[in-house]
């Protein structure tokens, strides 16, 4: 519900642009903040100066970040229907479900992912086709990245397969087989790069010692930040079930 005293703004917190709804009410005497499915809502007395608002929000940056992160943990699963919002390589795609043969390929055209099914309201069929497409894109992307980074690291390109793990993004077996979660294909490329570098580094160090992280760093200098970003994004990537 929108009304005249409600406006949308945004603020930079922790390097992220956080949108918020500002509600001004003549009856309010204090500032209130709420975080729910609509994101951050800030309620202020009508007469309060807006100039102090950014500073005030920044003083509560920790609380806002923590709450938003918690909320993202409970992100609802994707509804597999026309106009659904999907993620691919960090880009937001819109699903276009239309009638057509089950065997017709899924097509990415700009930011629209076209999926044909005999019944465009058949969410099971849509889901199956989109997940198969994700897996195919994931395997191609991860295979290419692993080959490039393995050469850089000076190791033989290891075999790669996809996992569907609930919590792990990747693993490296003692035999040197790398498994990567297909859901990573939704993440921005630098994050995929980090996970690939991480698992490849295990070919040299089967632990998380400082020596291990030094190897990761040679392939991925921004790994500390990317690791944090992956954590924040985690729940969103798991909305694809
Ligand atoms: Zn590891």
Image (cartoon, grey):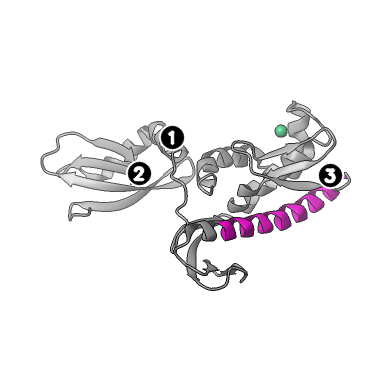
Q: Determine which of the numbered discs, if any, sits on residue 101 in the image.
A: none
Residue at mark 2: C-beta within 8 A of ligand 1: no
Residue at 28%, 37% in the rendered image: 33
Residue at 67%, 58% in the rendered image: 137
Query: Residue 94 location in percent, x, y?
Result: 48, 63
Residue at 73%, 33% in the rendered image: 213
Kindly identify which residue carries mark 1: 70
Q: Nearer the viewer, residue 160 or 130?
A: 130
Kindly identify which residue carries mark 2: 37
How packed is label 2: few (under 14 Cα within 10 Å), some, or many (20 or more)?
few
Left or right: residue 185 versus residue 146 is: left
**Range drawn in magenta:** 128-154
Asked where in the image residue 48 lies, by quadrant, the reply is top left
For residue 163: magenta? Answer: no
Residue at mark 1: C-beta within 8 A of ligand 1: no
Residue at mark 3: C-beta within 8 A of ligand 1: no
Structural distance between the alpha carbons of marks 3 and 1:
37 Å
- Looking at this rendering, what residue extends furthest in the front direction? 118
């Amino acid at each position: 519900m929108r009304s005249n005293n409600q406006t949308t703004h945004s603020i930079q917190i922790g390097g992220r642009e956080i949108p918020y709804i500002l509600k001004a009410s003549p009856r309010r005497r204090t500032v209130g903040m709420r975080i729910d499915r609509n994101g951050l809502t800030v309620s202020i007395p009508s007469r309060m100066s807006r100039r102090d608002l950014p500073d005030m929000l920044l003083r509560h940056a920790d609380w806002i970040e923590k709450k938003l992160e918690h909320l993202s943990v409970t992100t609802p699963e994707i509804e597999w229907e026309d106009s659904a919002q999907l993620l691919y390589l960090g880009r937001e795609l819109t699903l276009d479900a239309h009638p057509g043969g089950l065997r017709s390929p899924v097509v990415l055209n700009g930011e629209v992912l076209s999926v044909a099914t005999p019944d465009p309201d058949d969410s099971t069929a849509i889901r199956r086709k989109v997940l198969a497409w994700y897996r195919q894109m994931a395997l191609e992307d991860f295979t290419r990245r692993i080959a490039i980074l393995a050469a850089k690291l000076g190791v033989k390109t290891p075999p790669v397969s996809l996992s569907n793990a609930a919590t792990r993004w990747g693993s490296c077996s003692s035999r040197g087989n790398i498994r990567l979660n297909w859901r990573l294909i939704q993440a921005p490329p630098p994050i995929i790069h980090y996970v690939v570098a991480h698992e490849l580094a295990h070919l040299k160090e089967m632990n998380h010692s400082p020596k291990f992280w030094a190897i990761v760093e040679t392939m991925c200098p921004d790994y500390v930040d990317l690791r944090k970003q992956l954590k924040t994004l985690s729940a969103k990537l798991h909305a694809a079930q």
